[in-house]
Image (cartoon, grey):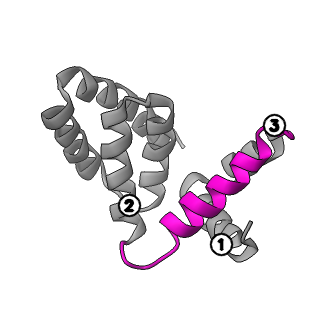
Amino acid sequence: MDQDLFDKGLAQRKATLGADYVEKNLAAADDFTRPFQEAMTAWAWGFGWGDDAIDAKTRSLMNLAMIGALGRMHEWEVHCRGALRNGVTREQIRAAIHVVGIYCGVPMALECFRVARKVLEEADAA
């Protein structure tokens, strides 16, 4: 594993998803899952998010659209929180969900709205 890419990825992953969340996931990794956690930190977060070609806010919006299209709502919730950390507004989250609805169908958009509402209510309460 490229240690520099891992370190860059770890910093970006923590900035987007929150240090507590990331540290909890890494601490919970065992011999079976640790290699994947390390590889994804280096590859997805270090390589995928590690350059300045696209800002973090735009990457977050892209993630919401793609993960919503895949219907992976647990990950969508995690990345919705991360999008807020990266400066994505409620209106931009809503617009991303509209795109999901247009290209992936109304049921998927409704699921995204349901999860977004939960995340936004939690953010309001914090």
**CA distance separating discs 3 and 1:** 22 Å
Type of the residue with mark 3:
Phe
**Image location of residue 45, percent across then percent down:** 56, 62
**Image location of residue 68, percent across then percent down:** 34, 36
Q: Which residue is rendered at x = 37% and y = 29% of the image?
A: 71
Query: What residue does disc 2 label?
Result: 59
Mark 1 or mark 2, which has the lower sequence index? 1
* Stretch of the chain drawn in magenta: 30-54
Asked whether, in this view, residue 37 is left or right of residue 49, the answer is right
Asked whether, in this view, residue 7 is left or right of residue 78, the answer is right
Q: Quadrant of residue 109?
A: top left
Q: Which mark is residue 32?
A: 3
Q: Quadrant of the N terminus?
A: bottom right
**Image location of residue 51, percent across then percent down:** 47, 77
Mark 3 or mark 1, which has the lower sequence index? 1
Query: What residue does disc 1 label?
Result: 5
Q: Which residue is rendered at x = 49% and y = 52% of the image?
A: 82
